[in-house]
């Protein structure tokens, strides 16, 4: 068989029909992160950033959640939805940043700062969440840290997001973990200056996982969910997008009258791109790969996630140092 663009389109459409049929049979819902492949975004029942997906996972009316993202996201969905089966289509879809921190090393650091609260970016394992006081996402990180009475904060694992929080909260001391996103950290100051020169009328909006010297050049620093909201409301017609390239697809669909530019060819998350329509269909057909969290880890991790969601609903919780 000779493969052409047309035959590839037909194949993808046949997979979409198969997935729709299996989804109905399995009473499943498909949750998709903004960085996924275009064709995977097309089959989403819910699509968004980490915070939006955490909230969507709680409210879905389904027996099965197919999570098109990476491992830590599926773990969070499993923690928040104990009565549902959570499937990750590709079990190898992990997050290098999440792997940069372990529960054991976090315990050791915590002993050095007994008065500090531990704030854990959701891009981390359930075991790390269980050793933390509260979680945050890139969209609510500043709000979460501001809500804490503690003046000293251990922030894991992303040093760039932590530095961004510090720049917004001068009354807090942020103790940074030496972790980072391998995709966002590739974006350089030189690439942004070149993009600004090439597109002088474009606004530059950047994800807070980018380097501090890149964020200084941004017109706005936003989570992926925040980018969608901002672009829709902005009077600007052109934007330089400082985050993973998967975001461009949805931005163009929702804002056809506006133009979007990637400042670098390196803004690709290989882990996010592992999931394909074929793997989604395979996962639903065989009901694999189920993500589970040990009960003793689940209870503590859920508390940290619940506290985060409470802050997002403008509620406060009273931190206890050394919890």
Image: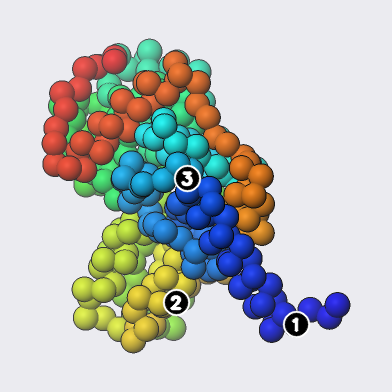
C-alpha gap between disc 3 and disc 2: 33 Å
Q: Quadrant of the N terminus?
A: bottom right
Q: Which of the 4 image quadrants contains residue 57?
A: top left
Residue under label 1: 4
CA neighbours of label 2 inside 10 A, class few (<14), some (14 to 19), many (20+): some
The residue positioned 37% from the left and 21% from the top of the image is 300
Q: Quadrant of the C terminus?
A: top left
Can residue 292 be seen here? yes
Per the rendering, the mark at residue 261 is: 2
SS assignment at label 1:
loop
N-term-proximal mark, 3 vs 2: 3
Q: Are marks 3 and 1 in contact (CB under 8 Å)?
A: no
In this image, 252 relative to 291: left or right?
A: left
Between residues 27 and 280, which one lies in front from this camera angle?
A: 27
Tell which circle, 1 or 2, labels the residue nearer the N-terminal end. Answer: 1
For the residues bearing labels 1 and 2, Cβ distance under 8 angstroms: no
Give me the C-alpha separation between circle 1 and circle 2. 28 Å
Q: Nearer the viewer, mark 1 or mark 2?
A: 1
Q: Secondary structure at mark 2?
A: strand
Q: Is residue 39 above or below residue 225?
A: below
Q: Which residue is mark 3?
A: 65
| Distance of label 3 from label 1 (alpha carbons) | 33 Å
Indicate whether 213 appears above or below 172: below
* Callout 3: SS: strand
Residue 308 left/right relative to 35: left
179 on left or right of 51: right
């Amino acid at each position: 068989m000779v493969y052409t663009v047309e035959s590839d389109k037909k194949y993808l459409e046949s997979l979409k029909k198969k997935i729709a049929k299996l989804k109905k049979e399995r009473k499943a819902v498909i949750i998709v992160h903004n960085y996924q492949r275009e064709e995977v975004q097309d089959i989403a029942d819910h699509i968004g950033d980490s915070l939006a997906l955490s909230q969507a996972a709680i409210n879905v009316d389904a027996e099965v959640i197919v999570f098109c993202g990476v491992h830590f996201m599926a773990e969070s969905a499993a923690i928040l939805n104990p009565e549902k089966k959570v499937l990750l289509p590709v079990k190898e879809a992990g997050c290098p940043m999440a792997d940069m921190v372990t529960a054991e090393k976090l315990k050791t650091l915590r002993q050095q700062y007994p008065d500090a609260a531990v704030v854990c970016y959701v891009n981390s394992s359930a075991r790390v969440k269980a050793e933390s006081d509260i979680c945050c996402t890139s969209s609510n990180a500043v709000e979460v840290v501001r809500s804490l009475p503690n003046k000293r904060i251990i922030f894991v694992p992303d040093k760039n997001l932590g530095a961004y929080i510090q720049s917004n909260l001068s009354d807090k001391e942020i103790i940074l973990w030496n972790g980072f996103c391998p995709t966002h950290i590739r974006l350089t100051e030189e690439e942004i200056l070149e993009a600004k020169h090439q597109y002088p009328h474009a606004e530059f909006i950047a994800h807070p996982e980018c380097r501090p010297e890149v964020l200084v050049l941004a017109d706005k620093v936003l989570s992926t969910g925040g980018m969608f909201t901002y672009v829709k409301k902005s009077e600007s017609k052109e934007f330089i997008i400082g985050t993973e390239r998967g975001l461009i697809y949805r931005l163009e669909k929702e804002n056809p009258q506006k133009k979007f530019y990637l400042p670098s060819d390196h803004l690709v998350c290989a882990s996010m791109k592992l999931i394909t329509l074929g793997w989604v269909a395979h996962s639903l057909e065989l009901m694999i790969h189920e993500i589970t969290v040990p009960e003793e880890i689940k209870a503590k991790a859920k508390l940290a996630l619940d506290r985060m969601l409470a802050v997002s609903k403008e509620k406060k919780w009273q931190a206890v140092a050394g919890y």
